[in-house]
């Protein structure tokens, strides 16, 4: 099994990344503020306007270290990665499946099934752990409705109908996110998903963490030889990692959403950690992003039992293992793609 290597996060807006020997060096002006051996890194995410040197980009590509560029606000800009590691037969099969409506829908519904299942278990976990602090009747009602969607998703053969079921389930789930917030409820009121730009603190936090998860999913897919841009659920669009977004669907609730709720409910992130612009857009402050990134890395080291493989692994390896299972399904080694069903 592949070891969980480190991801380097560069959050200073004026930081510049360069290569010295076998090290990635972070500079602010002429001063080096950090030095990291390339052999310990699996990815680099920079939130700096200054960028990185061509030499470092080449070194990362040669060593299959994914180098992602985001704005200081967390918007994904571009990703540099190494040579494709998978053989051409796997990618040809991926494209065939993506172009065939039947197999494409069959694969897409596995992602959606996993997403709705995990959304329900986020609610169930809250009911189990905080039963006396929440509206139990409301949460159980939504949980039951999500459960009733699962058989419909499992049998659906139309891509458009599948997207409709996914949309209805997402609406149900987000209707109770506000009820899952147990601390600072006034400062973290949630009234629905908003993006580009996020219009409240929870959406700002969700968007930032989703960017981190998207990077991990894209890197995982490329590492097993798949094309992260050719998806089954999300339509092809230049510059969009559609397959990474597909894989994210089942992992959003259990990895990203639960992480965000933990940050809020444990008062790790507070209302004053955000800045509100005149337009109403809400963004995490720089120091707050560092706090989120630190806890994100800690979260990825925590151990779980993989529900399909029945092996103990760190959370950070979940995207990689799901990408590996998807590759085996496309090769014909598995009858179906097994989504990650968290409990």
Image (cartoon, rainbow, N blue to C red):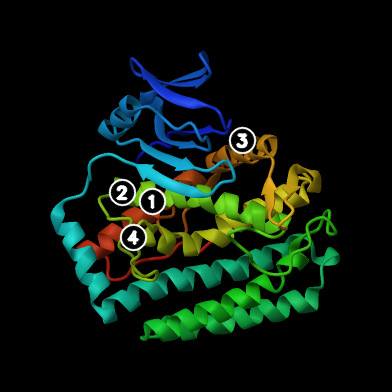
Q: Is residue 74 above or below residue 28?
A: below
Q: Looking at the figure, which quarter contains the C terminus?
A: bottom right
The crowd level at tag 2 (other Cα within 10 Å; few <14, some 14-19, many 20+) is many
The foreground one among 231 and 50 is 50
Q: Residue at x 33, y 65 (%)?
A: 231
**Mark 4 or 2, closer to the camera:** 4
Q: Mark 2 or mark 3: name the one nearer the start of the chain.
A: 2
The x, y position of residue 107, in whole percent, is 34, 72
Gap in angstroms between the C-alphas marked 4 and 2: 17 Å
Gap in angstroms between the C-alphas marked 4 and 3: 32 Å
The foreground one among 285 and 136 is 285
Q: Residue at x 56, y 38 (%)?
A: 297
Q: Are marks 1 and 2 in contact (CB under 8 Å)?
A: yes
Q: Mark 4 or mark 3: name the one nearer the start of the chain.
A: 4
Gap in angstroms between the C-alphas marked 1 and 2: 6 Å
Q: Mark 4 or mark 1: name the one nearer the start of the chain.
A: 1
Tag 3 secondary structure: helix
The x, y position of residue 164, in whole percent, is 49, 83
Tag 4 secondary structure: loop
Gap in angstroms between the C-alphas marked 4 and 1: 15 Å
Q: Is residue 231 above or below residue 104?
A: above
Q: Mark 1 or mark 3: name the one nearer the start of the chain.
A: 1
User: Would residue 332 be visible to someone looking at this image?
Assistant: no
The x, y position of residue 102, in whole percent, is 28, 81
Tag 1 secondary structure: helix
Q: Looking at the figure, which quarter contains the N terminus?
A: top left
Q: Which residue is mark 1?
A: 218
Q: Which residue is mark 3?
A: 294
Q: Mark 4 or mark 2: name the one nearer the start of the chain.
A: 2
The crowd level at tag 4 (other Cα within 10 Å; few <14, some 14-19, many 20+) is few
Q: Which residue is mark 2?
A: 222
């Amino acid at each position: 099994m592949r070891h969980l290597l480190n991801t380097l996060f560069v959050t200073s807006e004026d930081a510049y990344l360069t290569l010295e020997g076998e090290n990635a060096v972070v500079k602010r002006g002429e001063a080096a503020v950090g030095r990291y051996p390339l052999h310990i890194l699996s990815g680099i995410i920079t939130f700096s306007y200054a960028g990185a040197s061509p030499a470092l980009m080449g070194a990362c590509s040669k060593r299959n270290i994914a180098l992602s560029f985001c704005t200081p606000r967390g918007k994904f800009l571009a990703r540099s990665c190494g040579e494709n590691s998978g053989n051409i037969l796997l990618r040809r099969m991926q494209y065939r499946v993506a172009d065939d409506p039947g197999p494409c829908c069959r694969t897409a519904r596995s992602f959606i099934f996993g997403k709705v299942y995990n959304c329900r278990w986020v609610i169930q976990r809250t009911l189990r752990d905080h039963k006396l602090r929440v509206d139990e009747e409301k949460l159980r009602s939504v949980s039951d409705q999500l459960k009733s969607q699962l058989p419909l998703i499992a049998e659906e053969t139309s891509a458009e109908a599948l997207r409709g079921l996914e949309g209805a389930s997402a609406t149900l789930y987000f209707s109770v996110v506000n009820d899952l917030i147990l601390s600072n409820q006034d400062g973290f009121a949630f009234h629905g998903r908003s993006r580009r730009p996020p219009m409240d603190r929870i959406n700002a936090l969700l968007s930032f963490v989703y960017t981190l998860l998207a990077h991990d999913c894209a890197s995982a897919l490329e590492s097993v030889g798949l094309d992260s841009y050719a998806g089954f659920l999300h339509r092809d669009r230049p510059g969009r990692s559609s397959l990474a977004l597909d894989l994210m669907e089942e992992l959003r609730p259990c990895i990203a959403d639960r992480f965000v709720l933990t940050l809020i409910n444990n008062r790790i992130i507070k209302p004053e950690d955000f800045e509100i612009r005149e337009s109403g857009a809400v963004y995490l402050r720089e120091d707050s992003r560092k706090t989120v990134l630190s806890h994100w890395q800690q979260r990825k080291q925590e151990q779980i039992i993989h529900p399909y493989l029945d092996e103990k692994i760190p959370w950070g390896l979940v995207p990689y293992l799901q990408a590996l299972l998807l590759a085996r399904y496309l090769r014909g080694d598995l009858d179906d793609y097994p989504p990650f069903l968290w409990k």
